[in-house]
Structures are given as structure tokens and as C-alpha cells.
Amino acid sequence: MLIKEANSLGFTKAPKDTKVVVAMSGGVDSSTVAGLMKSEGYNVTGITLKLYDDTKPSNNKKRQCCAGQDILDAKRVSQKLNIEHKILYYQKNFKKEVIDSFIDSYLKGETPIPCVQCNQTVKFRDLYYYAKELKADALVTGHYVNRIQKNGMAEMYRAADLNRDQSYFLFATTQSQLNFLRFPLGNLQKNETRKIATKLNLNVAEKPDSQDICFVPNGDYSSVIKKYKSKSFRQGNILDTTGKIIGTHEGIIHYTIGQRKGIKISNVDPLYVVNIDATKNEIIVGTKKDLSIKKIYLKDLNLLTDVNKYYDNFFVKVRSTGRLIKAKIKINRKNNLGEINLKENEIGVSPGQACVFYSKTKIGDKVLGGGWITKADNNYLST
């Protein structure tokens, strides 16, 4: 039966007639979302993705997402809520789209962000299509990001809890996906989410947040690369900015632009990694001044709006925990490339990371899109 007033998800029909798929990772956020949807009377199906084979137990107390215990927790929450629950086995997709890309990126001297690629592929692409096949009205997730509907189109904004905001990791979301997605936690603080989970009597109410990349045990990136490409660890030279050899390294995968610790070379001024030359298998180190960035080059842009309309109100974020930086952008639409000119100082930007675009508005920081960093002209590279 149709009703005139829209429900909490924006559909002009009763919640019981609105079918939603909830992406359930087994953590408190997605479990709370499933509980909220059920309590509001929606027709809920919970779906958990098995993305990798976690055959070896970890002694690390930090929780990883999408592991065996998480799948069990998602199943228990679904049983508690009395909702249908499905498990999708996406290990092959995840290996190809995320793990292989992660390894290849490191071997190129980049610093990848697998969580963005996971959202871009198996979650917001493959799961999106599966939810469509189920004739769902919406795909609902526990991400901390705001979605506002305007004139039939969805816009993305940073979450109310800026310490939990995940918009940086969702920049590659397409407009059609955003129209279909819902994010009920966008206006909540994390402590409010846990209170709701406790009120719903969910077993994961006090479960720790995930800390590590799911397929990287104990945060040891090199162990993943050793597992799949053991021959990629090659010793090479460490050079200063004049080209002088001042040390050796045990593989470029151990380094990232802006890194200070682990260089193990004494100097009057602290040394930082200012460039990684994968072709020559060399690490170049310099001072903090050498890291200063003014220009960034991007590929594979995803634009949610015409960014030129925000010429005087355009900001970028170059790391997930970073600040919004005033900038200008030039776009090569033919090749889907971008050139960012920073209007404020920034250091240590690495290829492989994301550059996400924002505009400051009265209702929040609006996400305009973003792209992948291919090169950042620091003081060393631009001389």
C-alpha cells in the first residue's frame, strides 16, 4: 500500500513493503544498522561477504574485518533479529581485484589503499548487483557518511562524527550506486551506535573496531607480498638527494613516501623518504623540506558533480586522517586525468593513495569525487 509520506529511507511506501539488503561485516556498526532496519519494520536480508581464507589464527588483539569470527557474529546477530542471512563467497574476486592490486602497487613503489578498492569492487559493485538481483529497494551499510537526497539525486557528505567519517574511502562510489545506497549512521556518534546495539541486546555491542587490513595479519604488509611474490624482495641502494649512495635497503616494499622511521642512516637532520624509484630499485632520502608538495597528478577520476562549479570552494584530502586542503583542479576529460594545485602546504604525499574532493557547505562538507594519485611533485622531484 502506497503512502504519501516517505519512510526513513526515502521511499513512499510502508517499511514492511520496502526490501533492504544490509551488508553485515560482523562488527557493531553493520549489526546496529541491521537492528535499526528490523526495528523500523523493513523487510531485511543480511549479507556477509567471505573475502579471504583466514586459516591461520592471529595472536594480535586488534580485530580484522571479514574474518571467520566476524561471519559467525553476523550469523548470530541475524538469528537474534530473526532476519534472513546469506553468505557470499567472493574470495576469487577479492584476490584478483584487491590483493593482487595491493601487491602490484607496492612493487611499483606506491602505497595502496585496499579498503577503497574493496568498496569499489566486491562491495559496491558485486554486492550492488546482487542486491539488485534480489529486487531490493536499497543496499544499506554501516559506513559513517551522510547521504542527502536532492531532486531525485543523492549527494554524499562527511559524517557528523568526523573522527569516524569514511567518505575518503568511498570516493569511487558512482552516482547510480549512491542513489541505491543508504547510510543510517551518518548522523550518529560512535558511542551512540554502541548504545543502540546495547539496547537491541546485540552480542557485538562491545566488540572492538577493526584495526588492520583484513588480509594483512598483524599489520605486516611484507608477509603478504612474501606469500605471493617471494622473489620480489631485492636489496638496493639508498641515495641522498644529490645521488650519493649512503646505504642499502632490503626491498622497496618496506618504504613509503614521507617515511622517517626504519631508514637506519644517521644524519644531522632527520631523513625522510622523498622518492621511490621502482625501476632502479632505489630509495631516495632527504630532509622534511624536500617533502613539501604543491602539485599532484591523478588518474581514474570519479566525479559526482561538475567540480568546476566549486572553483572558489574546492578542497582536497590526500590521506584518510588528513585535513581538507584548499586547492585548484584541472581536468583532462578525454583521458580522465586530473592535476591538483595545492594552495596550502602539505608533505609526504605518495602515489597509490587517493585524493578526494570536497566543498564546504552550510549542511556539511560535500564529496565531489576524487582520483588516484600517480605522482606528487615535492621539492625534490620538481628541482
Image: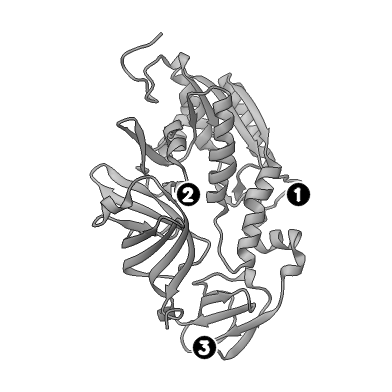
Residue 83 position, x and y percent, is 58, 20
Amino acid of disc 3: Asn
Residue 190 position, x and y percent, is 43, 41
Amino acid of disc 2: Phe
Q: Earlier in the sequence, mark 1 or mark 3?
A: 1
Residue 363 visible within the image: yes
Q: CA distance from mark 1 to mark 3?
A: 41 Å
- Depth check: 195 or 39 in front? 39
Residue 189 visible within the image: no
Label 1 SS: loop
Q: CA distance from mark 1 to mark 2?
A: 28 Å
Q: Earlier in the sequence, mark 1 or mark 2?
A: 1
Q: Residues within 10 Å of mark 3 (few under 14, many from 20)?
A: few
Q: Which residue is mark 1?
A: 56
Q: Earlier in the sequence, mark 3 or mark 2?
A: 2
Label 2 SS: helix
Q: Residues within 10 Å of mark 1 (few under 14, many from 20)?
A: few
Residue 236 position, x and y percent, is 67, 80
Q: Nearer the viewer, mark 1 or mark 2?
A: 2
Q: CA distance from mark 3 to mark 2?
A: 37 Å
- Mark number for residue 333? none
Amino acid of disc 1: Lys
Residue at horizontal 52 percent and vertical 72 percent from the top = 259
Corner quadrant of residue 226: bottom right
Residue at horizontal 32 percent and vertical 46 percent from the top = 366
Label 3 SS: loop
Q: Is residue 67 left or right of residue 21?
A: right
Q: Which residue is mark 2?
A: 169
Question: In the picture shown, does residue 355 fall above or below 380?
Answer: above
